[in-house]
Amino acid sequence: MAGSEIPASQGAKQLSASSGTLIDTTIVQANEFWVLVVEVWNTSFLGASVGQGLLAMVAVIAALFLRGIISRGIVFAMRRLVRKTKTKIDDAIVEALSGPFQLVPVIFGLFIATTILGLGGPESVGSRLVQAMVAITLFWALHNAVTPVARSLDFITQALTPVMVDWMTKALQILFIIVGAAAVLEIWSIPVGPIIAGLGLFGVAVGLGAQDLFKNLIAGVLILTERRFLPGDWVQVDGVVEGTVEKINFRSTVVRRFDKGPVYVPNSKLSDNAVTNFSRMTHRRISWAIGVEYKTSTEQLAYIRDKTLEYILNHPEFAKPPEVTTFMRVDAFGPSSIDFKLYAFTLTTNWTEWLRIKEDLAFELKRIVGDAGTSFAFPSQTIYVDDGSEVFLPPEQKSAPAQLQQPENPGGAN
């Protein structure tokens, strides 16, 4: 039994040898795995390794993640800077550029990514992509800055109406969009000339079928230059519409009727038809025909005339001659009344105030007519009957009516 036992020292040696073999095997496998990782990392795809692609992706993702934070930081710093100035133009420009500023970190991330991928050559795809993004950001900023700059410059707002300023800003914004698109196409070596020539031929074809569109556009320009009306004016277009102008667009004008229904009127209709702009009235007219009874004496008529004129001429809310024509005269002998003609103008053109002044005048007229001892007339008819009377007698009875007799019972009573 003792001969079959393994000495303790020999077992320890065997265990140590097996452990060393396991460690060596693990190290070899780890080296092989690392070699595999390096091979994958250095694997080329479209001229760039996987490692470069991953780093470029991380750069772009980080730029997208940080664009809000960085742009807000830039805008905040610029706001603090422009608050120190007295003009408001720079404040409006900073607010307009807050959107384009968000592309700045993205462009920087794309630049790093293209550099990592080795796409940063002068004519490379990466370089053109970065240049295109820069052009988009620049023209986007110009597009957004047009409106606040145009509305902040005093000489523009004084020389042009608000609607013309709005049209000018829209035209400049469209121009920046077109020029920006052409710049991006040029960056990608796409010739713009043939495209413009093709658009010219296309424009001729479209123009032949869009004559009404251009007619309305030209009419809109004429409306603005002539300043026939502005948004907020109360206008009446003969045979078309009456209401308040809300907006003058390139093709049509929005007029909201007094029942609150919007009417979209082509500008050519407004240019070709007579337009009455009630908002430009200097005064508002009151024209009444007032009838009193025929029994009213001449003294009473004169009293009504004089007291009514005295009230109008002394009232602070009525316009006075010679600025306007004002009179109260006996005008006509109507079918049922002697008619006065009242003609006066109020200083206000506001409809609500005008109604209130008319009401006060009506109350005063009622009092004056009552004080004169007469009354207002109303349609009536008088029937005159002669004093003599005619008596109509029925014709004489020539014969009495025959009386029916009961037949006698020949048999008598039973």
Image: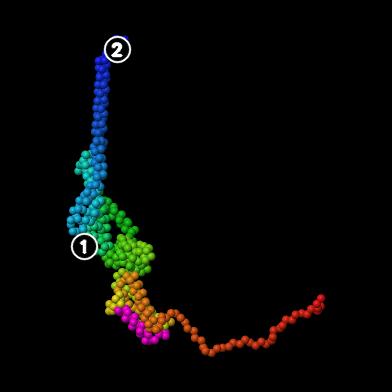
Q: Is residue 322 magenta?
A: no
Q: Residue 242 falls in which quadrant of the image? A: bottom left
Magenta span: chief secondary structure: helix
Residue type for callout 1: Asp
> Quick one: quadrant of the C terminus?
bottom right
Asked whether residue 268 appears in the rendered view, the answer is: no
**Residue at 35%, 84% in the rendered image:** 303
Mark nearer the viewer, 2 or 1: 2
- Residue that sits furthest to the front in the current view: 2
Assess disc 2: are there few (<14), some (14-19) or many (≥20) residues with their C-alpha within 10 Å of its C-alpha.
few
Q: Position of residue 19 (x, y in %)?
A: 26, 21
**Residue at 21%, 40% in the rendered image:** 115
Which label sits on residue 5? 2
**Residue at 55%, 88% in the rendered image:** 389
> Quick one: quadrant of the N terminus?
top left
Q: Position of residue 227 (x, y in %)?
A: 28, 66
Residue type for callout 2: Glu
| Vertical comparison of 346 with 206: above or below | below
**Residue at 32%, 77% in the rendered image:** 344
Asked whether residue 202 appears in the rendered view, the answer is: yes
- Check disc 1 and report the residue beneath it: 154
Q: Residue 96 falls in which quadrant of the image? A: bottom left
Earlier residue among tags 2 and 1: 2
Which label sits on residue 298? none
Please tell me which residue lies in front, 202 or 109.
109
User: How far apart are labels 2 and 1 at the CA level?
Assistant: 111 Å
- Residue that sits furthest to the bottom in the current view: 388
Q: Which residues are magenta?
A: 294-314
Q: Secondary structure at mark 2?
A: loop
Please tell me which residue lies in front, 341 or 217.
341
Assess disc 1: are there few (<14), some (14-19) or many (≥20) residues with their C-alpha within 10 Å of its C-alpha.
few
